[in-house]
Image (cartoon, rainbow, N blue to C red):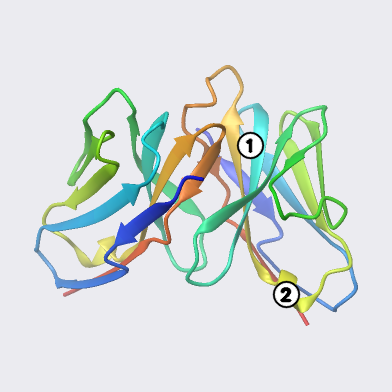
Amino acid sequence: GAVVSQHPSRVICKSGTSVKIECRSLDFQATTMFWYRQFPKQSLMLMATSNEGSKATYEQGVEKDKFLINHASLTLSTLTVTSAHPEDSSFYICSAGRLGLAYTDTQYFGPGTRLTVL
Amino acid sequence: KQEVTQIPAALSVPEGENLVLNCSFTDSAIYNLQWFRQDPGKGLTSLLLIQSSQREQTSGRLNASLDKSSGRSTLYIAASQPGDSATYLCAVLSGYALNFGKGTSLLVTP
């Protein structure tokens, strides 16, 4: 159990376009979902935390108008990269915390989405 | 701000060797520490989670220890196999966010 999926796994887009990435918890309900970004040879960096039915909390330095997060249900969160530029090219990974467990319990990670902006 | 450092950055060993990966963190006020495995271009697989009140966790050939007061953790891999080749990430939970190290890239050669 505790499977998290992401779609798409890989996307290539032109500069200036918007890209939506979905994160789904397949067999459990997730109160909280987290979005991370990973540049080559670098750590995963938390971008934002989203709770179902409320606004996302963004980390310092992350533009909330550029990275739109929607957590409309207990199994789905979406990240939309608006007006993407080449510097947004990265590996985006989501994780989910299981409903009913303390947030100090383990997070379950999705397989990631590789975004390339031309 | 929590800083997580992993040493070494890369490691290459012959099959069968026992090895130790190191992780250090600057703020000892943590809830837990996790070790993950990441294969190239893939997501994360959780290997071991150690709560702040625990000293170690074991799973198969893996053993992770935690010394919270000194801000250190080690991941011990016994009898390494080529299938263990991957990047190993250490992450600490302090506050609500997981803080990750840059990882140790492990190559186990046959």
Residue underneath mark 2: A87
- In this view, the residue in front, B105 or A114, is B105
**Residue A50: x %, y % from top left:** 73, 36
What residue is at 49 percent from the left and 46 percent from the top? Answer: B99
Residue A112 lies, in percent from the top left, at 60, 57
- Residue B108 visible in this rendered orientation of the protein: no
Q: What element carries label 1?
A: loop
Callout 1, which amino acid? Leu
**Picture disc at residue A74:** none
Is residue B12 shown left or right of residue A35?
A: left
Residue in the image at 42% along x and 55% along y: B101
Q: Depth check: B46 or B65 in front?
A: B65
Chain letter for the residue marked with disc 1 in the picture: A
Q: Toward which corner of the image does residue A48 lie, by quadrant?
A: top right
Q: Which amino acid does label 2 sit on?
A: Glu
Mark 2 Cα-neighbour bin, 10 Å: few <14, some 14–19, many ≥20: few
CA separation in Å, label 2 and label 1: 31 Å
Which quadrant would residue A76 be assigned to in this image? Answer: top right
Q: Position of residue B18 (x, y in %)?
A: 10, 58
Secondary structure of the residue carrying tag 2 is helix
Determine the chain carrying the residue at label 2.
Answer: A
Residue position for label 1: A26
Tell whether B37 sits left or right of A110. left
